[in-house]
Amino acid sequence: MTEFLLAVIGVLLIAVAALAVKVYTLRKAASEIAEAFSARLREDTNTLIDISSRDRKMRVLAEAVNRELKLLRRQRQQFTNGDRELKEAVAGVSHDLRTPLTAIYGYLELLEREALSPEAARYVSQIRGRAEALRELMEELFRYSVVASTPEVSPEPVNLCRVLEESLISFYGSFTGQGIEPEVAIPEEEIRRNLDPTALTRIFGNIIGNAIKYSDGDFAVTLTPDGTVTFANTAAALSSVDVGKLFDRFFTVDSARKSTGLGLSIAKLLTERMHGTIGAEYAEGKLVITVRFLETEG
């Protein structure tokens, strides 16, 4: 009886040991798949996932993941090619529009020198207004194509307070023209970050310009010591759905406005390139855009 029990125990120990080895190899294979999958998502490579385990089920799983990775890579390439073609098309269109637009301005100046009837003068004024709108749209398209095709930024120590103040001052005429008296809260002490000053100015300028365009008469900006800038304005014409699309390329709330919908898209692109965050919220008729640049080491 004792020998029988020992034999049973021996068999059980062997079974447990075999099961432990099996579990270990399966866990190792799963870990290899997870690590390799994560690496393939970060890198643009054709290298497939390979595992050390010979377990049939785990190898089937690895093959299934490889098929999905191939599909994802093809889709990523299609998106990249399409995005590049779009940027090139935008740059080409904005460039091609400059020549005829220059000619339009030339003819307008000649017309305005002529003795015109009140009705003809009104028509010429309307033509100039439309030409100005076209020029603004064209310049916005050109700026986007330049930003999108130049991914590099040149960071240097900058004072967020000063850049924000200068950006607000540059819009003084626009604020006055819209009857907006900004509420500004900026700390007296310097808040320094390692950022590209030109990109930072463009981010602030695009957000302020958007606020002036859609504000119902108010505007407030707050900068906190942790590098968070909050822009807020009442915008009854917006909705929570609109706000969710504000950073999408070519999205406009009102197609009649002089805008391509690229201003906030550019701001988002530049903010993320400098490792910052940007987002928008909408509550009780007020739009709040928050930009944050955390302090980095080194």
Image: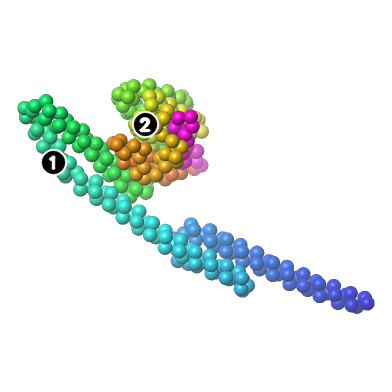
Can residue 18 be seen by looking at this rendering? yes
- Choose top left, top right, bottom left or bottom right for residue 236: top left
| Marks 2 and 1, how far apart at CA | 32 Å
Q: 140 or 218, which is in the foreground?
A: 218
Q: Quadrant of residue 259?
A: top left
- Read off the magenta span: 276-297
Task: Give residue 274's position: percent from left, percent from top.
Answer: 43, 43
Q: Is residue 191 visible?
A: no
Residue 64 in picture, x, y percent from top left: 53, 67
Amino acid type at image mark 2: Tyr
Q: Residues within 10 Å of mark 1 (few under 14, many from 20)?
A: few
Mark before the other along the chain sequence, 2 or 1: 1
As for residue 100 lying within the magenta part, the answer is: no
* Residue at the limit of the structure toward the front, as seen here: 119
Which residue is denoted by mark 1 in the rendering?
A: 103
Q: Is residue 47 left or right of residue 150?
A: right
Mark count: 2
Question: Where 30 sits versus 197, above or below?
Answer: below
Q: Which residue is at a point 51% across and 33% down the rendered structure image?
A: 226
Considering depth in this image, is 32 or 8 the residue closer to the camera?
Answer: 8
Quarter where residue 243 is shown:
top left
Q: Quadrant of the N terminus?
A: bottom right
Residue at x 34%, y 56% (from the top left corner): 82
Which residue lies under the disc numbered 2?
214
